[in-house]
Amino acid sequence: MVQGHAWGVIAILFSAIVWGTTGTAASFAPDVSAAAIGAAAMGIGGIAQALVAARGVMRARGMLWDRRGLLIAGALAVAIYPLAFYGAMRLAGVTIGTVITLGSAPLLSALIEYLLDRVRLSRRWTIAALVGVIGMALICTAEGLPKHEAIGRDSVPLGVLLGTIGGLTYALYSWSARKMMLGGMRSSVAMGATFGLGGVFLLPVLLATGAPFLASWTNAAVGIYMAAVPMFLGYLSFGFGLARVAASTATVITLLEPVVAALLAMIVLGERLPALGWTGVAMVVICLVTLTVPVPPRLAARAAPREVA
């Protein structure tokens, strides 16, 4: 049992690390658009996930049809997410794009649950959200930009907006997949169908924008890496780990992703943020830890009567 838990932790660590490499990897194909990068990563990788889960998806096709509204909403979010995420990193830099996207996702996820499922927003969530929003504001207003010729000061606000859209779509496809799972659908089927259909939606984008992948071996290698490693192997590894460790533990481990992304951006790309920007990054990480680390039962029992919607 302990050995299985250890392998689960290792698998999730692998996922977080390879997910954190995506922004830096994409920078090695600067003449490939963010839309093409996103479409290749999520499109090909998503269809590969669906093929792995194909047998279960076929057996559950009746259940999927009954929940087609959730499936289509999740698939559309899957299709929009990579376009926004890679666009944010291309316009605002890897560090800012990653932190804004991943930092906004849990906050927006809670808002979706509040609006659609009537789940109460606790005092803990409110405090964490305030810290996270202040942190993201500090990142956006900090003077200092990545040392990258393609990134200018005027492009950062648009990058931040795209990062927020990425966080929203991340939250939306996670919510829709979870709703299907709570309705009795196996996780592999819900995720395989959602990502597979999202990948199909992305194929026209890839066909329209993907020609630069064929212009050089470097561009082709970037496309293959993005689809095969972070998207396909990363999500398979994450699923393997989730079967062996608690979801709360897995979520905390994946906080390594923005750290890896920021370190690679500094070491490989020469990105720099001033002290104010790093203060914002630290506040976003604190927000994520606060949202994901489980509250001890005794403290939760004490806090429950005081929580307000």
Image (cartoon, helix red, strand yellow):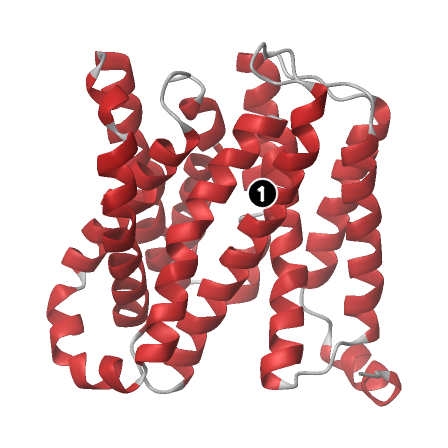
Give the vertical position of 47 relative to 27 (above or below). below
Q: Nearer the viewer, residue 71 or 14?
A: 71
Q: Nearer the viewer, residue 224 or 165?
A: 165
Please report the residue visible at 26 percent of the width from the left and 29 percent of the height from the top: 210
Please report the residue visible at 12 percent of the width from the left and 79 percent of the height from the top: 59
Give the vertical position of 190 relative to 293 (above or below). below
Q: Which quarter of the rendered picture does the N terminus lie within? A: bottom left
Q: Residue furthest right?
A: 306
Q: Where's residue 53, x and y in %?
A: 18, 63
Please report the residue visible at 30 percent of the width from the left and 79 percent of the height from the top: 68
Q: Residue furthest bottom?
A: 305
Q: Where's residue 64, x and y in %?
A: 25, 79
Q: Where's residue 175, x and y in %?
A: 49, 70
Looking at the rendered structure, the kind of residue marked 1 is Leu
Quarter where residue 261 is shown: top right
For the question of whether residue 246 can be seen, the reply is no
Q: Where's residue 161, x and y in %?
A: 64, 43
Label 1 sits on residue: 162
Disc 1 secondary structure class: helix
